[in-house]
Image (cartoon, rainbow, N blue to C red):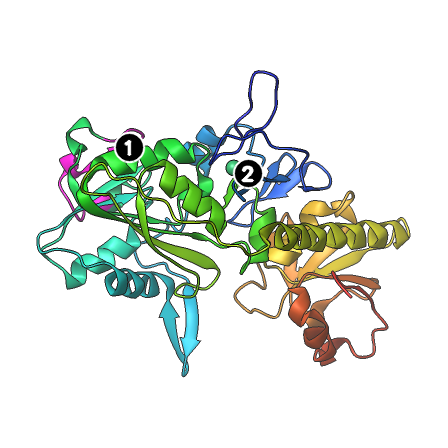
Amino acid sequence: MNRTASNRVSCNVCHADLQEPLFRSRGTRSVTSLARLVDGKTEVYLCRACGHVQSGALGDLDAYYASDYRILIDSDEEDQVYEVIEGKPVFRFDHQLDTLVGKVDIPAGALLLDHGCAKSATVRKLLERRKDVRPHFFDVSGDYVRFWEKMAPSDAWAVSTIRPEWHEFFDVITSFFSLEHVEDVAGVLAEIRSALKPGGTFYMIVPNLLTNIADFVVVDHVNHFTERSLERAFADANLSVTEIDTRAHRGAFVVTARRPVAEERSARAADDVDLEVEIHRIAEFWSEILKRIINAEAAVATGSRSAIYGAGFYGTYIGASLLHPDRVCCYVDQNPFLQGKSLFGKPIIAPDRLPDDVKHVYVGLNPAIARRTMGALTAWNDRGLRYTFLSE
Ligand SMILES: [Zn+2]
């Protein structure tokens, strides 16, 4: 987190001083985007100057990325299902590629840099369609070199700092789900701009808090961009925004921008949506969830055991927010791929395996579907369980 000498927190985008956090997590643990627990509180701030939302960073963010953060690194093929259409899964990286080629006219023989690229799965898929494209790779971590070397010679990648010969070098720079992790937004956008040829295209995807409110409490997403803060960040970097698309990728912004050819400056007017009201509503949503967890925990008798239903994001979030996680004996999930695994040292089990002495269950599901899901769960019909839901 950017802190000034007097220990004030400043905005990652516009550098304005930030006021008191809108939201503070409970206890000393926070949840990362990979549903891991880390030490430290999550604090979420709203910048009233530019509409940016940002979270307190982990203790040592650089070390965290260089060693801990290994997104989907197990194989080339590991991928997440984006959606299922007529029974057929559409994988996330295929969707990302389709969106990219639909929006960016990649010139023949293009010099392309994937910035903050991890294993660069989307570009790997692009190369299957476009053998003429010359890919380059940059990441703060060197963990992914073994993926890059299958696609390009060693002078086509850089770790930690970009190469000086990349000045005004690229036709296209891409960034898939990377800038939400970066404290120095202005610095990174300036670096990207300088690596682009005049007229070159920058294409970026970052989470959209307003369409994916779980993003609010993910501690390693230090940035939660809004349309306003995106406009501000790009205008400050003198990158001309062509489009901010909120529909092409669920829960995310897809931003297309161009480095102006001459030294023209361009900025778009901020839109007039009452963003602050919406951000406060999200902070309220998470505060209410914490309150419910606190109350439920206080109401459970010492010595009795609870379970958490759901081993996904919301279940993990409950586990991270409990003062006495030892009083939870297990996670329950209907996903057979999760059963038999463990979360925070507790087994993940099928509903019909719930131990007899468990009388209370935290429902770790998206509140929008939680009551319906539990109502349909016949395995527990005669158990007389008490449920704690995360919302009314
Ligand atoms: Zn700001």
Disc marking residue 159: 1
Q: Which secondary structure, mark 2? A: loop
Ligand 1 contact, mark 2 (Cβ < 8 Å): yes
For badge 2, the amino acid type reads Ala
Circles 1, 2 touching at the beta carbon (< 8 Å): no
Residue 156 belongs to the span the image colors magenta: yes
For badge 1, the amino acid type reads Val
Residue occupied by mark 2: 49
Residue 158 belongs to the span the image colors magenta: yes
**Position of residue 141 in the picture relative to residue 58 (left or right):** left
Depth order, front residue of 305/99? 99
Q: Position of residue 192 (x, y in %)?
A: 28, 38
Q: Quadrant of residue 67?
A: top left
**Position of residue 120 in the picture relative to residue 388 (left or right):** left
**Position of residue 194 in the picture relative to residue 31 (left or right):** left
Taking the spot 33% from the left edge, 45% from the top edge, the residue there is 118
Magenta-drawn segment: 148-162
